[in-house]
Amino acid sequence: LMIALTLVCWGIPLGTGCMVSVLAPFAQHDQDNPYANRRPSSGEGMLIGLLGVTSMFAIGGLIFPIALVMYVAVRASTWWSLSIGIGFSGAWSTAVWLVGLTVSSRIAQKREADLLTNMGARKR
């Protein structure tokens, strides 16, 4: 059951990531070590941390309907209720991804110059 849910819920983090990357973009620093965290000393640590926590709450809120449907399906404990629950999970996840992709594409078209300016220069 957990493997099936893992496979069908892929769209929620992707849809949320599409929205976050367009609404609050930040350039990654060019470094030799990709795991080095120099953001706190650059004055951007608080903003990026707050953005991460906000997106985690958004993902939690979007997963809540799936958790509710799967709770009812597991309590019913029949094969068809679990199938309906997994089908709903896949449909909801795909819908979240498509809405996130569509809305972020429209926002990106309006803010293209701003996004290119913000993301174009590499920071060291």
Image (spheres, helix red, strand yellow):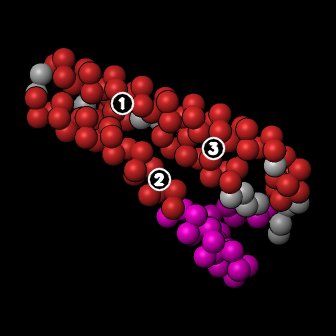
Q: Secondary structure at mark 3?
A: helix
Residue drawn at x 25%, y 35% is 69
Amino acid marked by disc 2 = Ala
* Mark seen at residue 89: 1
Label 3, label 1: how many angstroms apart (C-alpha)?
19 Å
Q: Are there few (<14), some (14-19), or many (20+) residues within 10 Å of tag 1? A: many
| Helix, strand or loop under label 2 | helix
List the residue tagged with mark 3.
18
Q: Say left or right for 112 vs 73.
A: right
Task: Answer left or right for 82 relative to 58.
Answer: left
The image shows residue 95 at horizontal and vertical percentages of 49, 30
Q: Which residue is mark 2?
A: 58
Q: Is residue 9 above or below residue 46?
A: above
Please give left or right for residue 33 compared with residue 5 in the image: right
Q: Which residues are magenta?
A: 28-53
What is the CA distance from the residue labelled 2 to the residue labelled 3? Answer: 13 Å
Examine the structure image and report whether residue 52 is included in the region drawn in magenta: yes
Kind of residue indicated by mark 3: Cys
Image location (x, y in percent) of residue 76: 10, 29
Amino acid type at mark 1? Ser
Where does the image place residue 82, in percent across and percent down from the top left? 21, 25
Mark 2 or mark 3, which has the lower sequence index?
A: 3
Question: How would you rate the neighbour count of disc 2 (Cα within 10 Å): few for under 14, some for 14-19, many for 20 or more?
Answer: some
Q: Position of residue 67 (x, y in %)?
A: 28, 41
